[in-house]
Image (tube, rainbow, N blue to C red):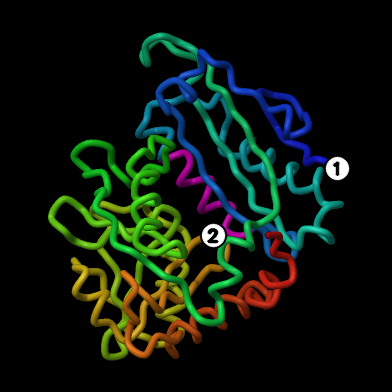
Amino acid sequence: MPTYTAYFKGEWIPSDEMKIDRQDRGFRTADVVFDAMRTYNGGLFKLGHHIDRLYRSLQYARIDSGLTREEMSAIVEETVERNRGRLKEDGDFQLYMFVTRGKGMWANIAGPATVGVEAYQVPFHRYAPFIDNGAHGAVAKTRSYSHQSVDPKIKHQARMNFNLAELEAKDIDPDAFPVLLDMEGNLTEGTINSMFVVTNGVIRTPTDDNILQSVSRSVVMDLAERLGIPLVEEQLQPYDLYTADEAFLSFTGPGVLPMTVVDRQDIADGKPGPITTQLLAAWGEMVGVDIADQAKRFARY
């Protein structure tokens, strides 16, 4: 199978030849920020939003990529073009761009930055089995980072808490996506997704105090407004998830994915709810793709 072409440190190389130096702080201390997006029908979705978020993360982390926003956008677009011949086989791409602080014993003297952009098939296999009947969730004991330590609004790779949460969720339910809480016990997010519940026709989602400023989350909010579905941001507890009429996740791959089970207990009747289904259909109409059908056709297990 032919490999993908990736951008790495100013060159275009086969993606499986991308190698991070063992002295790079991205490897040694997870001193790296990143962003990810996908294509629909080969066209990049919300590129500007992802570039803006990447550069907010870079600014917060005080990492200089050595590239302007326009240059980074052009690299992402060229990554798609260099791999376009694989679209028929893959369906669509996910794009991953990262910037490490580079080599150096101390953060204040490290550099230059290591920059990479690669494409790969959207991981349809991760969510295709759950589109029809809903995903499972499990509340992990490991908590989200507090904004008083590392602000979750930046998209960074220091994710040991996410790794542990994934393992803890699997201990409860092998099919479960982790559900994380903040230090006060409020719902935050998953390791790859934003969280939503529906109660009495109102979509409810955690405030952004201790979560990533998710592009997918913002799209859900825009779609809800367009469809006339009320939505509120508020502090939510596991109780609100256990007793919800519906629940769903939002992330890059499916846009919207129903969640019908949490901690091995059905949410409401254990079936995807009408608002979740409406949002997924609206997302597909917006991008011109039957999201469920595409995931099932192209998923590789």
Q: Which residue is mark 1?
A: 2
Q: Is residue 53 magenta?
A: yes
- Residue 165 lies left or right of residue 2; in this view the side is left
- Image quarter where the N terminus lies is top right
Tag 1: Cα neighbours inside 10 Å, few (<14), some, or many (≥20)? few
Q: Residue at x 43, y 59 (%)?
A: 193
Q: Is residue 34 magenta?
A: no
- Residue 153 lies left or right of residue 135; in this view the side is left
Q: Amino acid at mark 1?
A: Pro
Displayed quadrant of residue 40 = bottom right
Q: Nearer the viewer, mark 2 or mark 1?
A: 1
Rendered view: 123 above or below 248: above
Q: Residue at x 32, y 45 (%)?
A: 152
Q: Amino acid at mark 2?
A: Thr
Q: Main secondary structure of the magenta part?
A: helix
* Residue 209 in the image, given as x and y percentages of width and height: 23, 54
Q: CA distance from mark 2 to mark 1?
A: 25 Å
- Residue 46 lies left or right of residue 212; in this view the side is right
Tag 2: Cα neighbours inside 10 Å, few (<14), some, or many (≥20)? many
Query: From which residue to which does the magenta span run?
Result: 45-56
Identify the secondary structure beneath mark 1: loop
First in sequence: mark 2 vs mark 1:
1
For residue 185, which numbered disc appears in the image?
none
Identify the secondary structure beneath mark 2: loop
- Image quarter where the C terminus lies is bottom right
Front residue of 295 and 133: 133
* Residue 24 in the image, given as x and y percentages of width and height: 51, 17
Q: Which residue is mark 2?
A: 252
Q: Residue at x 63, y 62 (%)?
A: 125
* Residue 202 in the image, given as x and y percentages of width and height: 30, 84
- Residue 293 lies left or right of residue 57; in this view the side is right
